[in-house]
Image (spheres, rainbow, N blue to C red):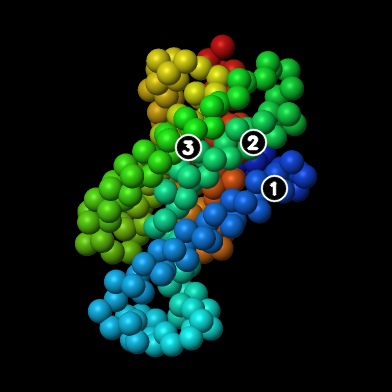
Amino acid sequence: MILAAFRHAAGQFGDPRFFRVAVLGLALTLALLLGVFALFLAMSPDPDQIPYIGQITTFGDFFTGRALAFLLAASIFLMLPVVAVFAGLFLPDVAAGVEAQHYLHLPPAPTPHPPGMIIAAANLVGLMLALTLGALLFVLPLTGPGFVLVFWALNGALLGRMCFAFTARRHLPLAEAKAMAKRKRGAIWGAGAVMASLASLPLVNLLVPLWGVAAFVHLYHRLAAAGR
């Protein structure tokens, strides 16, 4: 069920209804990565000699091989807040596109109030940044496969909880959405772990916000149908 959800979501990348969301999502992801990069440079004790990157003296130095490698590495750890912001801003558009193609037999979901979604996403960003930093303190002492597996497990739990909550709230009252998430927590964690593993692949992870949110729309409807 989980792999089918991601497969169907990937099959809709060519949908014209997804093009605007994909472009905006990619721009948002890159903007956040560049913002963190700029913060890293500002906090460096020696602005002329940046650790792991080298000397930054001109704008072109931002796009050297080492600088770009740093951005790609940073993107692995920034997917949680990126997905949270993406879901808060674009989930209604993504979900409407998925449901218009695959779930026409279901009644349309009410449109969430945009400010409410944005506020919820902002709260989740703060929570996830704190949890991600705490998780890093736990997993950094590990090496090799242990680091990767723990990182995927922890981030999978956070990503799954967040994406399913946003998706289920389009169709269910809060209490019912929480009850469903509790019943299906295994599948939700599994889908989140798939997202976390994809987020570990440089360049591929730039597609994770759109891909993961669309996959969770499929997963919600499949779990709801199984429950019925």
Vertical arrangement, residue 10 with respect to residue 109, above or below: below
Crowd rating for badge 1 (residues with CA inside 10 Å; few <14, some 14–19, many 20+): few
The kind of residue on which mark 2 rests is Asp
Q: Is residue 15 left or right of residue 222?
A: right
Residue 2 image offset from top left, x and y in percent = 55, 36
Looking at marks 2 and 3 on the same chain, the residue that comes earlier in the sequence is marked by 2
Vertical arrangement, residue 174 with respect to residue 160, above or below: above
Q: For the residues labelled 1 and 2, say whether their Cβ atoms are less than 8 Å apart.
A: yes
- Gap between marks 1 and 2, in whole Å? 10 Å
Query: Can residue 64 be seen by looking at this rendering?
Result: no
Tell me the quarter of the image containing the C terminus. top right
Residue name at image x 62 percent, y 21 percent? 109
Residue name at image x 44 percent, y 15 percent? 176
Vertical arrangement, residue 35 with respect to residue 14, above or below: below
Looking at marks 1 and 2 on the same chain, the residue that comes earlier in the sequence is marked by 1
- Gap between marks 3 and 1, in whole Å? 19 Å
The kind of residue on which mark 1 rests is Arg
Q: Mark 2 points at which residue?
A: 93
Between label 2 and label 3, give the one nearer the viewer. Answer: 3
Residue 122 image offset from top left, x and y in percent = 40, 41
Secondary structure at numbered mark 3? helix
Query: Seen from this angle, which residue lies furthest front?
Result: 115
Q: Mark 1 points at which residue?
A: 20
Name the quadrant containing residue 36: bottom left
Query: Can residue 131 be seen by looking at this rendering?
Result: yes
The kind of residue on which mark 3 rests is Ile
Residue 96 image offset from top left, x and y in percent = 67, 31
